[in-house]
Image (tube, rainbow, N blue to C red):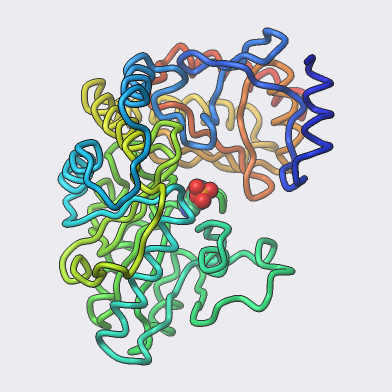
Amino acid sequence: MNKEQIIAQDEQHYVPVFARYPIVLSHGEGPYVYDTEGKKYLDFLAGIAVNVLGHAHPKLVAAIAEQAGKIIHCSNLYYTEQQASLAAALTKLAGMDKVFFANSGAEANEGAIKLARKYGKTLSEDRVEIITAENSFHGRTYATLTATAQPKYQKGYEPLPGGFRYVPFNDLEALKNIVSEKTCAVMLEPIQGEGGINIPDAGYLQAVRQLCDDNGALLIFDEIQTGMGRTGNLFAYQTFDVKPDIVTVAKGLGGGVPIGAFLVAGKVADVFHAGDHGSTFGGNPLACAAANSVLAVIAEENLGANAAVMGEYMMAELRKLQSKYSQLILDVRGKGLMIGVQISRPGREIVNRCLEEGYIINCTAGEVLRFVPPLNINKNHIDELIVNLDKVFAEFC
Ligand SMILES: *Cc1c(COP(=O)(O)O)cnc(C)c1O
């Protein structure tokens, strides 16, 4: 099938929930992907912060192939070495006590929310409220959609589950005003991703931690986008030095193979018992083999440190463009390789122009260009992108 035929077939049969770009991708290598017509793209979106090792990393490919030849799936009624070793490695690196494996970000958050509710009930029947932040993104299932405090995602799906309350992100006073003996958890992204790469003020997350402790509430960090080395450490809470009671991770964890997880520490680690939660696929040996390989490569290739250094370099280069195009570029912000560029117009056209030029970037929250590239990129890749951005920005000034 040619490109037009593939697109037509998909449009005819796939539920049209995605506003897709008109290209058909075929394969990738490192930070590059190729479409079916052989055109090459530099990929600074990386499957939305998923392909942390880039495309077709030989170690990840070998780990998946080797595991597929042994056993792909066996259900969670049995033990596997891949799952046991991933559980050990991830809890150790995270400094947490226990882990549960799911298949996606939303599912990891769903489990974390259920766990928080169950924990709240051990304190009192009324301790059910979960407080989340405006402009957050936590997923598309019913509980996670309700946790996602953005009306555009919730509209049309009412009635939503009860017990969720919202505050502006990075506003400690607002949080103080609604935390109570009914609060079972406060759930935040340490840096809001989908909401526009919103970085909290220094001290905000620490103060939230303290507020939770003072009120007997749990702190849940959704690190589905910030985790897996992106901000310079395996988890952003290590970068910000604030430890949550529950942390969720997904996106980069399997390097593209679907897997999510929640990790728990301390008093919450012993809340769930046999039968309280579950998953057929979650943490199957194929997904765990992939995640074990991703963790090994992140350590071997020092990708957290690379993300920190490359992030600083890229933001410095972007700030040069900001001074050149100050009408268009209002702000450059980020941590490691999670970078947002606030612009003064909708970003979609700029994203489209970059795609035509062979650069995959993304726009979120309407007017924020988002860059979440593979963590193993180097300066040459950044320079290549910056030259292109310079050219495209000039067209919009
Ligand atoms: C992507 C994302 C999710 C949802 O993950 P899915 O795998 O799409 O369900 C949840 N939280 C954050 C912060 C995310 O970036």
Q: Is residue 297 left or right of residue 360?
A: left
Q: Quadrant of the N terminus?
A: top right
Q: Tally the numbered discs.
A: 0
Q: Is residue 79 visible?
A: yes
Which residue is nearer to you in this view: 144 or 205? 144
Where does residue 193 sit, x and y in percent of width and height? Answer: 50, 48
Which residue is at 58% across, 32% downward?
Answer: 322
Which residue is at 28% across, 77% downward?
Answer: 119
- Residue 301: image quadrant is top left
Which residue is at 42% across, 84% downward?
Answer: 177
Q: Is residue 190 left or right of residue 86?
A: right
Where does residue 214 sit, x and y in percent of width and height? Answer: 23, 81
Q: Is residue 259 above or below residue 45?
A: below
Q: Is residue 197 above or below residue 153?
A: above
Q: Quadrant of the C terminus?
A: top right
Which residue is nearer to you in this view: 135 or 299? 299
Which residue is nearer to you in this view: 173 or 157? 157
Which residue is most to the top?
38
Q: Is residue 192 visible?
A: no
Q: Is residue 190 above or below residue 13?
A: below
